[in-house]
Image (cartoon, grey):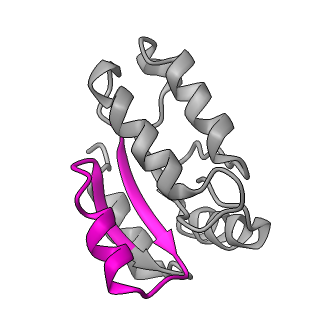
Amino acid sequence: MIDDNELEHLIVQRYLDKLDLFQSVEHSLDAKASLKSIELNKSNMGMLPDLIFLDLRMPGFSGWDFLNRFQMIYGNIVKKIDIYVISSSIDMNDILTSKTFDFVKAYYSKPLNKAQLIAIFSKYKIN
């Protein structure tokens, strides 16, 4: 999860723990550092996430900056990484623009709720 608000991390992690979803979750307050980690590990499938929850509105290197840079390296990454945008923005332009990126699977307004997390998890659950 990439979000500059630590409270958002706490809320999502509590849901995940309570529902026993996504056993290994990494949290980052810094989108630029997260992107750098992906770039450094682009050939190491075990070091790459299955999905990313991404906030759009962060100071400095924003979620938009992340999406644009991620798009440039996406074809060189050995593993498909899906991104779920989670934002406080309800601006229709933000919603529509985020969905122009093929790897963005959905846009959710904050805060994420239990049903949304279960729906996302069900797409990645290994039976």
| Res 55 → quadrant | bottom right
Q: Residue 27, position in %: x, y?
A: 68, 49
**Relative depth, front residue between 2 and 112:** 2
Which of the image's four quarters has the C terminus?
Answer: top left
Residue at left offset 34%, top offset 38%:
71
Measuring from the top left, give residue 2's x and y in whole percent.
61, 53
Q: Per the image, is 85 magenta? A: yes
Name the residue furthest top: 43
Taking 119 as reference, is 88 left or right? Answer: right
Is 48 rendered above or below residue 44?
below
**What is the magenta range?**
81-107
Residue plotted at (57% across, 63% down): 16
- Residue 42's place in the image compared with 125, above or below, is above
- As for residue 117 lying within the magenta part, the answer is no
Of residue 2 and residue 113, the one placed in the foreground of this image is 2
Whether residue 29 sits left or right of residue 48 in the image: it is right
Instruction: Give the x, y percent position of residue 70.
Output: 42, 38
Of residue 72 and residue 77, the one placed in the foreground of this image is: 72
> In which quadrant of the rendered view does residue 120 lie?
bottom left
Residue at image point 36% right, 71% down: 107
Work out which residue is located at the far right of the displayed protein and give it. Answer: 6
Residue 83 at x, y percent in the picture: 38, 52
